[in-house]
Amino acid sequence: MRFRKRPVEVEAMQFDSTSAGVAIVRWAQGSVQGVFDDSHGEYLLVETLSGPVRAKRGEWVMRGVEGEFYPITDAILRASHDPLDEGRGHGRG
């Protein structure tokens, strides 16, 4: 069988700076934990349906259709979603 992704509107914010990370933490209301830093660089800890996952700098945090959050790389987001507005670091696509 073949499937086509349904056209749905989702929200996403890009973690491209420390201040963007802080804004994502506020936006996600408990589903994303602070901005952390280790030998691999800054990251956010995103509580996904499968457990906690790191979002690295440059990735996006997306809110899915059921209110769940998960990280997505910039390349995958742009390959699978069309932007609907051009807000800096925060878009619906």
Image (spheres, rainbow, N blue to C red):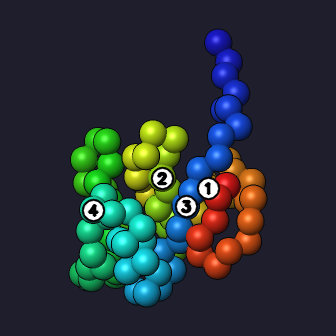
Vertically, is 82 above or below 42?
Answer: above
For label 1, the residue is: 77
What amino acid does circle 1 point to?
Answer: Leu
Residue 39 horizontal side relative to residue 2, left or right: left
Q: Residue at x 27, y 62 (%)?
A: 30
Q: Mark 3–mark 1 contact, CB under 8 Å? A: yes
Q: Residue at x 73, y 71 (%)?
A: 86
Q: Quadrant of residue 7?
A: top right
For label 3, the residue is: 12
Specify which label sits upstream in the sequence, 4 or 3: 3
Vertically, is 82 above or below 8?
Answer: below
Please indicate, yes or no, whether residue 75 appears anywhere in the rendered image.
no
Specify which label sits upstream in the sequence, 4 or 2: 4
What amino acid does circle 4 point to?
Answer: Gly
C-alpha separation, residue under disc 2 versus residue under disc 3: 6 Å
For label 4, the residue is: 30
For label 2, the residue is: 63
